[in-house]
Image (tube, coloured by chain):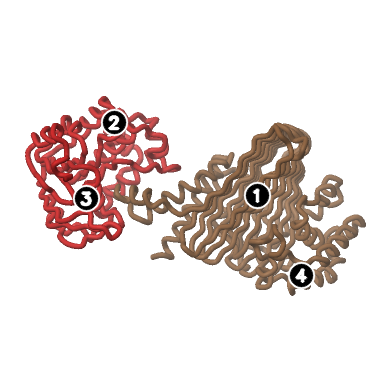
Chain colours: A red, B brown
Amino acid sequence: MLEIKNLHVKVGGKEILQGIDLTVNAGEVHAIMGPNGSGKSTLSYLLSGREGYEVTKGSVTYKGQDLLPLSVDQRAAAGVFLAFQYPIEIPGVTTMTFLKTALNSVRKARGEEELDAPRFLKLVREKAKPLNVADDMLKRALNVGFSGGEKKRAEILQMSLLEPTLAILDETDSGLDIDALKVVADGVNALRSPERAMIVITHYQRLLDYIVPDVVHVLSKGKIVRTGGKELAGELERTGYAEFAA
Amino acid sequence: MTDAAKTFVETYERERGSLPASGLVWLSARRDAAMKEFAASGLPHRRLEDWRYTDLARALEKASVVSAPLHKGDVALPDATAINVFGAVDRHVVVFVNGVMQTKISDLPSGVTVVSLSDALSADWAKTLVETRVSDAQAANVTALNLALMRGGLALHLAKGVKLDKPLHLIHLAGDDGASHRRNLVRLDDGAEAVIYESYVSAGATNYFDDVVTNVSLGAEARLTHIKVQDEAAGAVHLATLTAALAAKSYFSSFTMTLGSALSRNQTFVRFDGEGAQAHVNGATALRGRQHGDQFCIVDHAVPSCTSATLYRTVLDDASTGVFQGKVIVRPYAQKTDGRQMSNALLLSRDAAMNAKPELEIYADDVQCAHGSTIGELNREALFYLRSRGIDEQSARQLLISAFLDEAFETVPDDAAREGLRALAADWFRLALKEDA
């Protein structure tokens, strides 16, 4: 699904990623853990295609194709989805309008038929229900005045509508209390499938109690310094990142 | 004096005897005095503070300023979005060509008078309105020019308590190059209600000067909703002055959508004469190329307990220029005033420029007033977010620009017209997409 080889990335002239190697297969959930400033968010933004990230060396292959020349929206259409740590507030655009525009853009790019209003409404309600996203929230401007939990649930709703093949969850647990975390984790777990790969980026082990990964990587100073099974997360929780930060 | 100003003076000398209602002694005297006033100072120039950002004199050097012919032949209604925008509404339509009224409406309810300016001038209410002076000395000059040369226009009078059964749609067509000075008079007696739509478009003219003064007077508890769309030809100069005098508990709402002309200026003067009245002066502007659009608005709270709100949203592409100059005056006795004013501009290009000058002038102490101005560009984070959900760049930009303008459209108190304005904005984008492609 995703193959990253010796990836070096500069942001604002500074090398943040210094040779990442990572292979994620379909059906797998990989956790990337690491201290602040280790390059976790840089990796997620780079994969989503955000401007300002300069690849100086290495390659990213997605479904056998070079991912890097694709634009942000082309990547989304190809099935890459980034759940934001801080979803952006967009006044004046209702959540419903946004979801419909996004879904139909992606469907069109994937050669699928666009959904008319009644069919879209039926689908969005079906997907929104298990995430406790009420109609009222869908009528509000996107993320404007949403609580932390509402924002994250809205992210997972988008993911479930757009049906990505590679989902990257950037610090999805930040700002969530335990009840909200469970709702979000249930939403993510419901989307686990043999055709879909996920990268879960997190500072804390807590999220991984609910979204149990197949593989855990530790990122430090722009490199993956350790890789292990799900038990590695528990170990880090006990020992902290001190040994990697040093 | 500039060539354009000279042309106006000469035009007056030549046409003085043939101007409408030239038999009215008071009017001829007022016209003479007005032309004298205009000739003494000429066209406004940029050394005048209120004209600092808008060089009308220079724009008129390029425009054709000899009088446009009084069109008599049939002019086909162009298939223009600025007209069709009100198409979904059951309405009375009055067409003007070069300022001259072409149609008479026969099915009007009793108590409603809709006539051409020249047919109204002998009435007392019309006389009072024509003699309205604008409070701003630097704007008075161009209204003096209009008074001297005014030929066409509409006069609407609603008797006490009369509600106009359907909106009145004024379609102003520029059929020929040249200057057309026209005057619209709107008098709503106590408790009367009306909705007026206006469309300004070209029907063949390319180089012209539209000089429109509209004088509104509302009786106690009268209500007027005014929605105007200006989509003049690319070579046009559009100067529109609107004065509104509001009696107690009256309601005035005016929305101006500006899309067309090389240079345009909408100057609005609202004066509260009675307590408990409300004025909403709003607008949306979308410009491209080298277009210049100026929104100038003075709201004068001369009496207590009135509410005013002004919101302008401006989107500027290419090398276009936008101007917002707004002033809220609260006179010493005007306690319990609620006055709000906001201008927000979105620059889509490095070469676009916005000038904003919001002002409050408050002499009373028990008031609520707020004003502000923002100038910004499309939020990159928001663009990235939308695109990361599969929305292509152009659509993402369009979504954000629409959302930006939509907050202005939300102020339009007429559902059908609001939808029409949204469609008009969408049209503007489509053109932008075509040009970029």
- In the rendered image, which quarter is residue B15 located in? bottom right
User: Seen from this angle, which residue lies furthest front?
Assistant: A246
Chain identity of mark 1: B
Q: CA distance from mark 2 to mark 4?
A: 69 Å
Name the disc covering residue B326, or none: 1
Residue picked out by circle 2: A176
Name the disc covering residue B5, or none: 4
Q: Position of residue A37 (x, y in %)?
A: 24, 47
User: Same chain for the residues at labels 2 and 3, yes or no?
Assistant: yes
Instruction: Judge the density around disc 3: few (<14), some (14-19), many (≥20) Cα neighbours within 10 Å.
Output: many
Q: Position of residue B349 (x, y in %)?
A: 46, 61
Chain identity of mark 3: A
Q: Nearer the viewer, mark 3 or mark 1?
A: 3
Instruction: Judge the density around disc 2: few (<14), some (14-19), many (≥20) Cα neighbours within 10 Å.
Output: some
Of the pair A227 and A246, the residue shown nearer to us: A246
The reply, left or right, for residue B314 in relation to residue A215 is: right
The reply, left or right, for residue B305 in relation to residue B31 is: left
Amino acid of disc 3: Leu
Classify mark 2: helix, strand or loop.
Answer: loop
